[in-house]
Image (cartoon, helix red, strand yellow):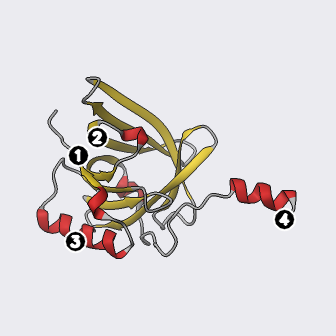
Amino acid sequence: MSIISTLTSLFKKQTIPAGVKAVENFNVKKYLGTWYEVARIDFKYEKNLNNTTATYSLNKDGSIKVVNRGYNYKTNTYKKSEGKAVFVKEKNTGMLKVSFFGPFYDGYNVLAIDDAYTHALVCGRNHDYLWLLCRQPNMYEAIRDRYLKIATANGFDINRLLWVVHDQ
């Protein structure tokens, strides 16, 4: 393997799990605003957080401003992270990459969304990242079950989901 191909493989990062497809006919303007995390596969940057939300708005350069908030129930403090997202492909495909740390991007993929843009299923670059989002802190059971079936069909282990508490 040449040095150039080695470097290329180090910096070329997969943004969606193999075999998983992001939604098409995605409308970023309808996606903007605040979303509540109903459930997630927990990971280090959201460890011990509840009352978690993500708020999206357009930046002047066409990228998407991302503001994640949550309450750390162990330290009794709020945590806020700001980043930006850009489309990986066409702007009508829900396949983006997001950065909270300078030039380092990771996958952010909308796998399912309803017509009213009130419920969404989002994953990261692999099967260790999954979020169930809603415009309200709670989701109806029938809707939740439909999105969990989609997650399972795409290879996600829904038994790993942490159900987010919204009590503040």
Q: Nearer the viewer, mark 3 or mark 1?
A: 1
Residue 88, how many percent across, how many down? 57, 61
Q: Residue at x 35, y 38 (%)?
A: 47
- Disc 2 marks a residue whose amino acid type is Thr
Question: Which residue bears the numbered disc 2?
Answer: 52
Q: Which one is in front in this view, the residue at disc 1 or the one at disc 2?
A: 1
Q: Amino acid at mark 3?
A: Arg
Element assignment for label 4: loop
Label 2: state its secondary structure: strand
* Circles 3 and 1 in contact, beta carbons < 8 Å: no
Element under disc 3: helix
CA gap between label 4 and label 2 equals: 44 Å
Give the amino acid type for the residue marked by disc 4 in the picture: Met
- Report, in whole angstroms, how far the alpha carbon at label 1 lies from the one at label 2: 7 Å
Is residue 67 among the parts visible in the rendering? no
Nearer the viewer's eye, disc 4 or disc 2?
Answer: 4
Task: Mark 1 or mark 4: name the one nearer the start of the chain.
Answer: 4
Looking at the rendering, which quadrant does residue 2 occupy?
bottom right
Residue designated by label 1: 164
User: Upstream in the sequence, badge 4 or badge 2?
Assistant: 4
Residue beneath disc 4? 1
Disc 3 or 4, which lies upstream in sequence? 4
Q: Tag 2: Cα neighbours inside 10 Å, few (<14), some, or many (≥20)?
A: many
Vertical position of residue 75 compared to residue 49: above or below: above
For marks 1 and 2 on the same chain, the one whose residue lies earlier in the sequence: 2
**Residue in the picture at 27% in, 27% down:** 74
**Against 67, is 113 above or below?**
below
**Occupied quadrant, residue 1:** bottom right
Q: Position of residue 139 (x, y in %)?
A: 16, 57
Cα–Cα gap, marks 3 and 4: 45 Å
